[in-house]
């Protein structure tokens, strides 16, 4: 399975997570978001960029509880909570935002 | 410490057990180190009293400046630094294992508690569950 995008074909797994993180780009993120019926806003990007930084630093995608805690610490309590994140990513912030960020599925996420 | 296990499940309180994950193998070459690390990260979600121990060649898992890219392995030594954010802060390394390999606490990617073999034995005896790999 693959995203057909800008004339290229980018492999993903059965749930839409990229096979090769190195193929990610901001344009591809917008494309994946569209397939999820999401329009990327600055608030969506803030979460996606946060996840990519977290992955760079720790080499894993964080569990949702860890994400909300870390977001709260960096961006304030009004953004570090489940309600805020689920409003942005209705199908689960960890799973859906990680997919758009080109990261693997979070460890421990079923 | 003992009160942790004396909560009554019938009263609707969560039972918290003392878990210890024991790492004894070098980080690469087998899947054990990475699999245990993933198990530890998942276990953090269940709000148990998690301990992680490193002994024998397992101490190499925490060594700084690994370059496993040349083995086509991910450098998951960085992931140990995420443990704190997952609330896992009880990390023990056996002194004798470090000494035998010419390593010291300063060579490790995260702050740990270095304890001797006798203290490690005592600590293991206090656990409800010990998983070793």
Image (cartoon, coloured by chain):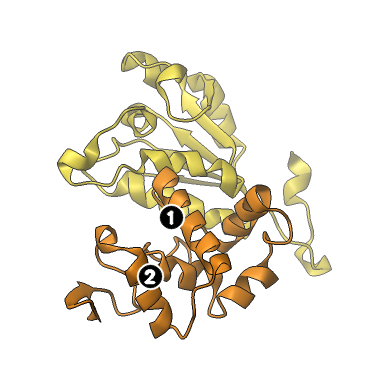
Q: What element carries label 1?
A: helix
Is residue A110 something that shows in the picture? no
Q: In this view, does B133 lie to the left or right of B17?
A: left
Q: In this view, does A4 lie above or below A42?
A: below
Label 2 marks a residue whose chain is: A
Q: Position of residue B31 (x, y in %)?
A: 27, 49
Q: Pick the residue in front: A84 or B75.
A: A84
Q: Pick the residue in front: A20 or B43.
A: A20
Q: Pick the residue in front: B56 or A109.
A: A109
Quadrant of the rendering where the C terminus of chain B is positioned: top left
Q: Position of residue A44 (x, y in %)?
A: 53, 68
Q: Is residue B39 above or below residue B108?
A: below
Q: Is mark 2 on a helix, strand or loop?
A: helix
Which residue is denoted by mark 1 in the rendering? A52
Q: In this view, does A86 lie above or below B61?
A: below
Q: Pick the residue in front: B16 or A53.
A: A53
Q: Is residue A59 above or below residue A9?
A: above
Q: Which residue is drawn at 33% across and 29% down?
A: B60
Q: Which chain identifier belongs to the yellow chain?
A: B
Q: Which of marks 2 and 1 is in front?
A: 2
Q: Residue at x 36, y 28 (%)?
A: B63
């Amino acid at each position: 399975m693959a995203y057909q995008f800008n004339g290229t074909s980018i492999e993903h797994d059965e749930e839409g997570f990229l096979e090769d993180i190195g193929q990610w780009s901001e344009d591809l993120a917008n494309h994946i978001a569209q397939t999820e019926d999401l329009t990327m806003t600055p608030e969506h990007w803030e979460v996606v960029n946060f996840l990519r930084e977290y992955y760079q630093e720790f080499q894993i995608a964080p569990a949702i509880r860890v994400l909300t805690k870390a977001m709260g610490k960096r961006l304030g309590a009004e953004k570090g909570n489940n309600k805020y994140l689920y409003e942005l990513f209705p199908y689960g912030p960890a799973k859906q935002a990680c997919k758009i960020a080109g990261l693997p599925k979070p460890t421990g996420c079923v | 410490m003992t009160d942790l296990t004396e909560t009554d499940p019938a009263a609707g309180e969560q039972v918290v057990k003392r878990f210890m994950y024991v790492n004894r193998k070098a980080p690469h070459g087998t899947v054990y180190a990475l699999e245990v690390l993933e198990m530890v990260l998942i276990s953090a979600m269940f709000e148990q009293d998690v301990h992680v121990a490193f002994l024998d060649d397992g101490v190499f898992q925490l060594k700084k400046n690994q370059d496993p890219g040349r083995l086509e392995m991910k450098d998951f030594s960085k992931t140990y630094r995420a443990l704190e954010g997952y609330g896992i802060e009880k990390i023990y390394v056996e002194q004798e294992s470090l000494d035998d390999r010419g390593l010291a606490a300063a060579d490790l990617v995260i702050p740990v508690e270095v304890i001797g073999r006798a203290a490690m034995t005592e600590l293991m005896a206090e656990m409800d569950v010990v998983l070793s790999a």
